[in-house]
Amino acid sequence: MNMSSKFYNNVKTVFLMCALSSVLLVAGGLIGGMRGVWIALAFATVMNFVGYFFSDKIALSSMGAQEVGPDHPLYKIVEGLAQRGNLPMPKVYVSPQPAPNAFATGRNPNNAAVCATEGLLQMLDRNEVAGVMAHELAHVRNRDILIATIAATIGAAISSLGYMFMFSGNRNSSAEQSPLAPIAGLLVLILGPLAAAIIQASISRSREFNADKLGAEMCGDPMYLATALEKVHMGAAVVPLQGNPAFNALMIASPLSAGGMAKWFSTHPPLEDRLMNLIGQPTTGRIYRR
């Protein structure tokens, strides 16, 4: 990624994150006036603290992942890619799930972990696994994981505020509350999570394109990742991924099929767009030979 596109991507991410935070604060204000804003801020603070320090453990636990050492083939692949990408060696995990997928997690490159499912390791050859793991290490280098975590936790806070309104019956005695607060609260309950989902998807999709490009560069051949993506998408359509849906955005391929209006909420670009994004990327110094 060149400097201008990287700058544009960072500006876009900051804008989208501000928009997501604004939705959270507006939701709190509509439901409970200034008191609601303070509740929203408290929600964001607690959830972001948990997300920052514990999201990796939560994500890995939800997948039943187990750490593997230097004797495992996946560890050796990741080690070579990390050296090539000038990255600290992350922890390497394998999930027993038969669905083919992979993800990276952790708050920064020095506290990162990558995970692949057994289904992915059985479906792909060594070069394709390298392409997938290079994509995940690209997320680590770009610090996408922290951004995705913050987006997910703020989105969850918006949903939680809506449910708080639904179950509390909007029994707020604050004098500053508007007579229209019940209607506003209902709109927050319905539209708040919708807006959060669209913004989260916008953040994730742009990051996926960038990680595909950088991953192709790290493994030395864009076709490694391109053929892997095709196989993973086909496999994911047949074998469903079991786990917390909140972590779908971390996966290399969306566990859910998105068609029609659902594309607006998908955290991943369509496969065809990702393949077109990889076409024309240079082949330079493959890490493995076919």
Image (cartoon, grey):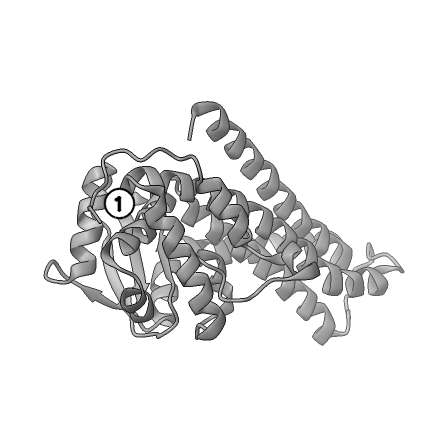
Q: Mark 1 points at which residue?
A: 110
Left or right of residue 125, residue 270 in this image: right
Going by the numbered disc 1, the residue's amino acid type is Asn
- Where does residue 173 sit, x and y in percent of width and height? 79, 65
Q: Residue at x 86, y 56 (%)?
A: 178
Residue 99 in percent (x, y) is at 39, 71
The answer to whether one can see residue 251 in this image is no
Question: Residue at coordinates 43% horizontally, 45% vertically from top-left?
Answer: 144
The quadrant the N terminus occupies is top left
190 left or right, relative to 117: right
Pick whichever, 42 or 156, lies toward us: 156
Of residue 108 and residue 217, the one placed in the foreground of this image is: 217
For the question of whether residue 260 can be seen, the reply is yes
Q: Residue at x 28, y 39 (%)?
A: 220
Residue 126 lies in quadrant: bottom left
The residue furthest front is 290
As displayed, is residue 104 above or below residue 218? below
Instruction: Give the vertical position of 92 relative to 282 (above or below).
Output: below
Q: From the viewer's perspective, is 272 left or right of 67?
A: right
